[in-house]
Image (spheres, helix red, strand yellow):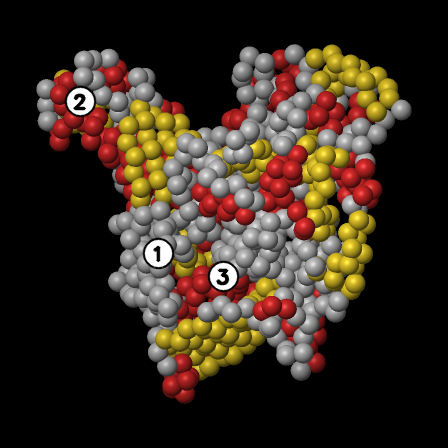
Amino acid sequence: MTRKISYIFNGNATETEIEDHLTLLELIRDRLGQTGSKEGCGSGECGACTVIVDDQAVNACLYLAAEIDGKTVQTIEGLANPNGTLHPLQTAFIEHGGIQCGFCSPGMIMSSKALLDENPNPTEDEIKHALAGNMCRCTGYVQIFDSVKAVSAQDEQEIKAVAWKETQ
Amino acid sequence: MSDFAVIGKPIPKLDAIDKATGRVKYIQDIKLDGMLYGKILYSRYPHARIVKIDISKAKALPGVRAVITGEDVPPKMKLGFYKDNPPIKTGKVCSYRDEVAAVAATDLETAEKAISLIEVTYEALPGVFDPEEAMRKDAPLIHEKHRSNILKLPWKLHYGDVEAARNEAAFVVEDRYSCTWVTHCCMGTSGAIADFDYANNLTIQTNTQIPSLAQKDFLEALKAMGLTEKRVRVIKPCIGGGFGSKLDTYAYEHIAILLAWHTRKPVKIMFDREEEFKATSTRQPAIMNIAQGCDADGKLLFRDISMILDNGAYTSWGATTPSVMMMPITTLYRVPNVRFKAQCVYTNNTYAQAMRGYGNPQATFAIESSIETLARKAGIDSAEFRRINANQSGDVSPQKFRITSCGLNECIDRVQTQLDSNTSKEKGVGVGMASLIHVGGGARIYKSDGCGAIIKLDDFGKAVVFTGATDIGQGADNIVNQIVAEELGLLTQDVHVVHTDTDVCPWDVGAHASRTTFVAGNAALGAARKIKGQLTELAARVLESKPANICLRERVASDKTNSKKSIPIDKLLRKAHFSAGGQMLSSEYFYDPDNENMGKDFRGNLSMTYAFGAHGVRVRVDVETGKVKVLDYVAAHDVGRAINPLLLEGQVYGGVMMGIGYALTEQVICEKGEIMNPNFRDYKVLTAKDAVPITAPVIETIDADGPFGAKGIGEPGCVPTAPAIANAIYDAIGVRIKDLPITPEKVLTAIKERDEA
């Protein structure tokens, strides 16, 4: 069975004809050609495929593409301002050593964004909880926490000024 | 302390912006026009004769372009240094990960379907899964032509007189330690794309840590296929983690080559996570018997170690880990009499590869657990015991390792200070320590330990560096960049580093042995010095000064003796190019360190310098559940010089966390040769929730041979982690766990045994 779905993808109204069994990750990577979201395990254990659907961080490898009909999807490619300004989380991950091999980074950054959008000043435990589903083999997480904390410590207005939603 | 403009600065990873924005391409993200998808059929038995393979149904499936079996593999195409591993097996299979057939199809689903249609008839053979059982005369033979399961490898040394020293020792301890399989768990799984041009030259895009040596392996593969005088180009996409896993070439790469050859199309083989667990290699497991003794003052007199290593069914670098284990065995602390023997034994299990530390974490687990036990037996504080025996600059160890810069004592002091800062003696809480030595100035494993660098400057004051170094996420590109920028008076943003393509990058033996900062760094420095000579001469001419007076710094060439004389470097370069009789500024340099291959008795100065460190940990053990919680971790490392403190700390944090997993949670559960936990639910890599507070004091000893004084730091972070934790558990509850990982079950069993005793 196929169906047509309509959704907002990284700020752009989009329509795609899909098979019912297509996952959101397959849609993003194979149909839309956006390869920033990664497949690390294909079974929702590693979080490398994390994207944001209507403010919620989800594992795109487990999420059916059909479910995004009428919703808003944001991937790592849609996080920076189209004018080229990086999201503060991207800047923080770069500057604080939150990225080594980088394979987990898109998912890690998207999970961090979903966290900070909901809770701009998380405690260390709240950061750990929010990122528990995003595995990293390189960093020992220390500099990833540093990166998230660097943004959460910033002035809330400043973040909102550049946050993705406000730039659309 | 220093007057550097770029060295010592926490400059973010050069490719981090592309990684943070999702632009960077891993092998997962690469698709070529007309590309086919390859898939491999693995054995259903750990040990069996292959009676018959029927590929007719698979071949008939629409979309299938090729089906190959062992019959299609040239006999000379073999993998690994022991050449006992054909990429597809014929006759019999010796482990579950044995490749039996492979297909190429127009899409992945068709390839998977075709694999399921291949019918293989097996005749099961008795297997052997325990290396000690496999050593028995009546054990089933894995490779009949070898007539024994014990590999003929030379791992045996004896320096001094261990027996005599043992008789003299005031205190002796003797124990058996063991550690099981763990695996790299790179977040990006393995994959390769092979593609032939019409002249039969091969381009292969693959996840590798050894572009130049992989190129050699693939050239040999082509020769075995009858393709002589051909070129192989290895392109390394962005790599989603290495940790040693990409230090050998794998069957899947050779199968991709064969399929591409059969179909005349580019063929991609991409592992899923289950395949990554089942068909890539592990850290070398080990059974280790150790005895150590000291005199009444705590001076070590001897160390005597024998090991049995489960080689699995085939031989990759795991079987050579004893060559690195020798380093801590002969040279961690001053120990005059040393004996070591390791036997590698074929079984029907999976086979091991290189993994961060290359045998050192295993050996150090035994040595440092035993050191702690010995110190306690001698009644000496264990940190003091370590200081009594610590290596010192100027030492030559029994293996003839020459210790140059050495910050071991400072590392021990820093760890002790931090552990002593919290003296509250809570029940179930304990502290532990362990030290490490590792190669820090290259490692002459091959006849060469060299790396090349080529630099060219353009009209705009920018440099491009072509390096042999391989960045696998650790930041090799940054180190090369910072060294070149510093030497040429440029800024980080002026230096572009290319490290991805054997067609343009110079030769190197690979990202292993924590050698890249030292060896590739010195290569880059050598090339930069040559070009600096050209630049200063040019500047002297233009500024009417002497080359010796020219200073290059922050994009400007100036005369040290006359502040009015200066010229921007980019302008200087334009003058070089756009003038009659002009010159092009470029240079190349090949650096091969002055270290030594180990001789027949394994003596020889393997590395130009050695990295030292000490780790300390505070743990809480729940005696009801057996669960160990790491409360506080300190990892002090002698790094020579921190060229980039941000990335250096990242190496230590990541290494420590991998080491904590090794100590407490990680194990590939292999039952009768079958991997039972090929997923992240059941193979416990530590998550953000398990993260522990780590401090990483950096001890700078400014090594005389290192580039700007630096030594290697890639592996040391995970070397002493497990014994530090085991020692802390002993301190907390008085039980000694001698088998990794230290699971709650083992802790509870040990408590029960102690209480019953």
Report the chain holding disc 1.
Answer: B
Vertical placement of residue B299 versus B278, above or below? below
Q: Nearer the viewer, mark 1 or mark 3?
A: 3
Asked which quadrant contains residue B8, the reply is top left
Q: Earlier in the sequence, mark 2 or mark 1?
A: 2
Give me the residue at 40% from left, 43% from top. B508
Tell me the SS state at disc 1.
Answer: loop
Would residue B456 appear left or right of B475 to someone viewing this image?
A: left
Location of mark 1 (residue): B607
B408 is higher (above) or lower (below) than B19: below
Most extreme residue toward the right is: A1
Where's residue B184, x and y in %?
59, 50
Which residue is at 52% across, 41% downward? B227
Q: Is residue B406 above or below residue A155?
A: below
Dot 3 surroundings within 10 Å: few (below 14), some, or many (20 or more)? many
Q: Are marks 2 and 1 on the same chain?
A: yes
Find the distance from the CA under tag 2 to the CA under tag 3.
51 Å
- Residue B258: image x %, image y %? 62, 41
Looking at the rendering, in which quadrant would you find the N terminus of chain B?
Answer: top left
Disc 2: which residue: B539
Q: Which residue is mark 3?
A: B320
